[in-house]
Amino acid sequence: MSAVTSVLPYAVAAWLFGVGLYGIATSRNFIHLVGCLGVCQAATYVLLLGLGYRWGSIAPIFYDHPPGTPAVDPVMQALVLTDIVVGATLTALLLVLTVQAYKRGGSLDPEKLRPMRAGGKSGRDQGSSRVSEGGQQAP
Amino acid sequence: MSVILPLLFLFTALSGTAVVLVRDPTRQVFAIAINGLVLTILFDALQAPDVALSELAVGSAAVPLLFLVALMAVRTQAPGEDS
């Protein structure tokens, strides 16, 4: 087709990636940040499918078409399928880490995140209470 | 057919921008689900029905549910208390 429509998938992918990065950089909430990372992943889906797409061709399923009919690239679709599964797993992992960081640090704001070492205030209090509990249970 | 594909690309860009610009995580869950639906329709228009199916299951159902579970865990649990 025309030049605008052929460049449109790449432009949309670049826009989505840029907007997702902007959201990650300016986010003040970890859960919102994970959602912005999902937008960056959506950019990779659009990029891969836009790479494999051919105008006027069928889906790569040859049940009711003769073999040799022009079809879109099935390899890119397999890559996007893998990408979606990995993205969902990554989202779940990061949300669990967010909940754990909230339990430790008491805030969802990335600016207020304390380093996870013994010098941190909440971490040291929890650690000492856990040690004392363990000492009481041991004998 | 040559009009609907650029339109769907523009919708995808708009819904992704909406996900970023909705700053409240509780409302962002709805934006994520709508983004998953728009991506599903786009993938179907891009002749990728299997990817559209998995995006429908993952992007507009499973991931928003994960966000809801995380929001629930953050709300019901005071910081510093273990499960």
Image: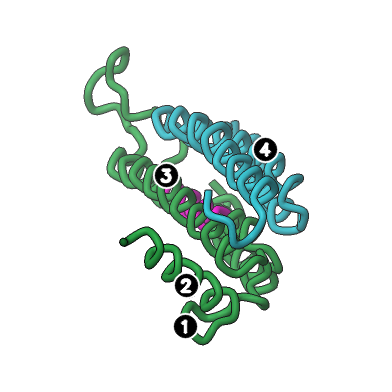
Q: Is residue A68 left or right of residue A44?
A: left
Chain ID for label 3? A
Is residue B49 depicted above or below B29 in this figure? above
Circle 2 residue: A127
Circle 4 residue: B34
Q: Amino acid at mark 2?
A: Gly
Circle 1 residue: A118
Asked whether disc 2 touches disc 3, contact meaning CB atoms under 8 Å apart, the reply is no
Numbered disc in front, either 2 or 1: 2
Q: Amino acid at mark 4?
A: Ile
Q: Residues within 10 Å of mark 3 (few under 14, many from 20)?
A: many
Expressed as whole percent of the image width and height from the top left, the position of residue B33 reads 64, 38
Is residue B45 depicted above or below A132 in this figure? above
- Residue nearest the observer in this picture, A132 or A11: A132
Residue A19 seen in render: yes
Q: What shade does chain A have?
A: green
Residue A7 seen in render: no
Q: What shade does chain B have?
A: cyan
Rendered residue at 31%/23% (across/down): A61
Circle 3 residue: A84
Expressed as whole percent of the image width and height from the top left, the position of residue A123 reads 53, 74
Ranked by sequence position, the earlier of labels 1 and 3 is: 3
Numbered disc in front, either 2 or 4: 2
Cα separation between marks 2 and 4: 43 Å
User: Which residues lie in the magenta part?
Assistant: A38-50
